[in-house]
Image (spheres, helix red, strand yellow):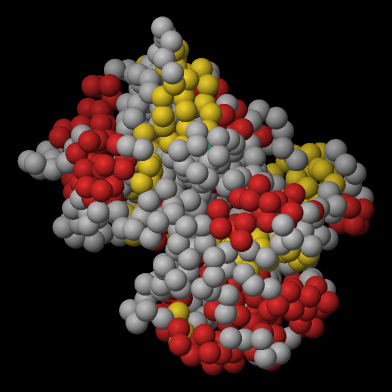
């Protein structure tokens, strides 16, 4: 495939997406020309999303950080001048040292989340540095906290149905996920299954592209997935469709679950959720009667006060209805449980536990934390664009006694508040190892080009800071090759994985790439059973597991604002490339009631903040629901505030997760 100056090199996408595409990168004279999907990962099938296909704009765009910068003006204005790496690292090391001496290690907060899902870019040398400094620890809770806890509680993280196997399903339920914009490779498989006669049910407050093609679309009010799932569980038991034999053999807690679901009649749920009784009943009958049936459970249902219980109830459905044991039957949430490679273990967990800071409370902690945070080190994250209570985060970042480092690929909204900005390499410029959480693949990526400008990989920068602060130890893995070797050595199949990564370039877990639940995969709980009413979850849940908490709306803020992902960004990643103004969407009835017209400039507001933007009237939303995408940057709205300015920092009933979809707002003309 080589010509004189052009090479086509393999790579793997490490971005926060379930699919983990295998890639082919065309490089001419050391410059990336093209990114395409390869067929190495069977799921990729030679195509990738438009976000990554256009990665060159991110790699070489004007916003790309090429040199270390030090602040020269007021925080937030983005006024910097170039410095050399040695001075930048010395400045940071000095501040880390003095902060620890004067205020204690817990005055340091590392803030990292989601910019890369690569093993080498998070939780390796960074964790080693911050643990040895005695820094506060970040609880990464803005996404997947409640889902992970529910999956662990019920099934001990049992992985799910491989996307490829959806083609065998006769009924596919897509619940709180939108594969048309995230995890796109599922869409053609669903379409194939439909062409072969499979039915499709979509549960989502919005009419997503798949909902438009579904046999049944249920649009519950945000936060009411729990009662919807409980009413199905009740109906399965009462109608005699529950698989009592399966549950007797493979589950505990079925009677307790039945009792807790018993009050959720379809009539009561219709009132709470807005889903008509007949649709609930149709769904129940279809699910009971169709096998194999698979539920693709997304992360939408977790982003509210009932999130943990909602996910637990959705995941309980295949157990109650006896849908396991056949190819194309069961559930898929995250398949990361198939791998037992833990990069955090490389950091050596021998340092004493320190204060844990819930990521949802970073704004509050920056303003009122005790002990106060004096050093904030942000990497792989853009907290201003992604954390709840945006205004608190922004005011916190303005604090004069806070030293902020942002280690990033592009100049983000958060980076504009930094004291020192460090340029980071992308996955095309550094070594990476990536495990899928939708696909079962493990892929390795080597640098395909030299770093752009003076950018450096995370493992290099954190390794160097460890040495400057005398926190390194003889013989520890440091180079990317050593880190990968140490990771693979955690598996009994380490040598086998290494060989597979070398040739053909992809590895799969012991269970293979298409395991079947209750044939190849079993619950990882202590007794190997499904815990339909896990005692641990029941103790932890705010009001006990499966307890519904009412809508947080009120007269001043009656509209539920959801902020789902779009095809343009991955959370906030690539937000610098989306320059246009983004509108809030609402149902025509709600607009009419407020005297608003399509294209009006409006205020979307509540007690936490206000976003000024254009209005788009949409029949894809139910009355009472408004929508703005997640991950917007300040340039996407009229006043610079984005939907997370309206999101509360309240927590899910399990695991302290984010409640973005509990944002309740009013919308009025500007
Ligand atoms: S973001 Fe997802 S779909 Fe896009 S290239 Fe990466 S893994 Fe593939």
Position of 289 relative to 555 (above/below): below
Which residue is situated farthest in the top direction here? 4
Residue 72 seen: no
Position of 239 relative to 635 (above/below): below
Instruction: Count all numbered tags in the image, as a single digit.
Output: 0
Horizontally, residue 628 falls left or right of residue 52, namely right
The quarter of the displayed image where residue 477 is located? top left
Which residue lies at the image location 58% right of the left edge and 42% below the top edge?
631
Q: Please state the horizontal and vertical placement of residue 250, each as a whole percent of the image.
A: 45, 83
Q: Please state the horizontal and vertical placement of residue 175, each as a whole percent of the image.
A: 65, 63
Residue 450 seen: yes
The quarter of the displayed image where residue 614 is located? top right
Position of the N terminus, as image quadrant, is top left
Which residue lies at the image location 38% right of the left edge and 16% below the top edge?
453
Horizontally, residue 213 falls left or right of residue 142, namely right
Q: Please state the horizontal and vertical placement of residue 138, each as a whole percent of the image.
A: 36, 54
Position of the C terminus, as image quadrant, is top right
Which residue lies at the image location 29% right of the left edge and 54% below the top edge?
342
Which residue lies at the image location 48% right of the left edge and 51% below the top edge?
439
Which residue is situated farthest in the left direction here? 474
Front-lying residue, 423 or 415? 423
Front-lying residue, 54 or 403? 54
Q: Please state the horizontal and vertical placement of residue 505, each as a whole percent of the image.
A: 36, 38
């Amino acid at each position: 495939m080589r010509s004189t100056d052009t090479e086509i090199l393999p790579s793997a996408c490490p971005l926060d997406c379930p699919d983990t595409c295998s890639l082919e990168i065309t490089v001419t004279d050391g410059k990336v020309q093209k990114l395409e999907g390869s067929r190495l990962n069977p799921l990729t099938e030679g195509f990738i999303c438009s976000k990554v296909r256009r990665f060159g704009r991110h790699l070489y765009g004007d916003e790309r950080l090429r040199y270390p910068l030090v602040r020269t003006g007021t925080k937030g204005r983005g006024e910097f001048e170039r410095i050399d790496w040695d001075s930048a690292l010395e400045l940071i090391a000095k501040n880390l040292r003095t902060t620890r001496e004067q205020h204690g290690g817990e005055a340091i907060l590392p803030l990292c989340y989601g910019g890369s899902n690569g093993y080498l870019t998070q939780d390796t040398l960074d964790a080693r540095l911050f643990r040895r400094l005695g820094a506060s620890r970040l609880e990464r809770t803005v996404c997947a906290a409640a889902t992970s806890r529910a999956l662990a509680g019920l099934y001990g993280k049992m992985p799910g149905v491989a996307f490829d196997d959806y083609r065998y399903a006769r009924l596919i339920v897509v619940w709180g996920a939108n594969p048309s914009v995230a995890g796109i490779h599922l869409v053609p498989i669903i379409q194939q299954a439909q062409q072969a006669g499979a039915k499709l049910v979509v549960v989502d407050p919005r009419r997503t592209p798949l909902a438009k093609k579904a046999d049944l679309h249920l649009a519950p009010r945000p936060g009411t997935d729990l009662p919807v799932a409980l009413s199905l569980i009740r109906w399965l038991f009462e109608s005699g469709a529950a698989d009592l034999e399966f549950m007797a053999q493979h589950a505990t807690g079925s009677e307790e679950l039945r009792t807790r679901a018993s009050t959720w009649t379809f009539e009561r749920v219709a009132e709470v959720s807005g889903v008509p009784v007949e649709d609930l009943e149709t769904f129940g009958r279809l699910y009971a009667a169709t096998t194999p049936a698979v539920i693709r459970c997304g992360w939408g249902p977790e982003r509210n006060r009932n999130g943990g219980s909602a996910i637990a109830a959705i995941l309980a459905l295949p157990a109650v209805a006896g849908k396991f044991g056949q190819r194309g039957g069961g559930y898929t949430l995250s398949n990361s449980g198939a791998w037992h490679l833990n990069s955090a273990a490389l950091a050596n967990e021998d340092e004493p536990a320190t204060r844990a800071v819930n990521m949802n409370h970073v704004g509050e902690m920056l303003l009122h934390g005790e002990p106060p945070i004096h050093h904030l080190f942000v990497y792989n994250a853009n907290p201003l664009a992604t954390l709840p209570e945006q205004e608190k985060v922004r005011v916190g970042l303005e604090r004069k006694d806070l030293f902020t480092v942002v280690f990033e690929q592009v100049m983000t909204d958060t980076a504009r508040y930094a004291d020192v900005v460090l340029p980071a390499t992308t996955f095309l410029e550094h070594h990476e190892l990536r495990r899928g959480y939708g696909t079962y693949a493990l892929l390795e990526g080597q640098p395909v080009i030299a770093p752009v400008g003076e950018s450096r990989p995370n493992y290099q920068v954190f390794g160097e800071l460890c040495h400057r602060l005398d926190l390194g130890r003889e013989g520890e893995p440091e180079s990317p090759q050593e880190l990968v070797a140490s990771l693979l050595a955690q598996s009994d199949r380490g040598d086998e994985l290494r060989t597979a990564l070398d040739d053909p370039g992809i590895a799969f877990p012991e269970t293979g790439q298409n395991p079947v639940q209750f044939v190849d995969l079993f619950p990882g709980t202590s007794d190997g059973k499904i815990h339909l009413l896990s005692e641990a979850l029941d103790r932890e849940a705010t009001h006990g597991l499966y307890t519904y908490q009412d809508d947080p709306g009120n007269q001043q803020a009656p509209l539920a604002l959801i902020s789902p992902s779009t095809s343009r960004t991955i959370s906030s990643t690539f937000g610098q490339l989306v320059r246009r103004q983004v509108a809030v969407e609402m149902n025509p009835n709600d607009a009419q009631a407020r005297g608003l017209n399509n294209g009006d400039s409006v205020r979307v507001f509540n007690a936490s903040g206000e976003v000024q933007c254009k209005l788009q009237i949409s029949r894809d939303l139910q009355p009472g629901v408004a929508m703005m995408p997640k991950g917007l940057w300040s340039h996407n709205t009229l006043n610079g505030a984005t939907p997370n300015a309206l999101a509360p920092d309240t927590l899910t009933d399990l695991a302290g997760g984010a409640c973005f979809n509990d944002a309740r707002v009013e919308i009025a003309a500007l």
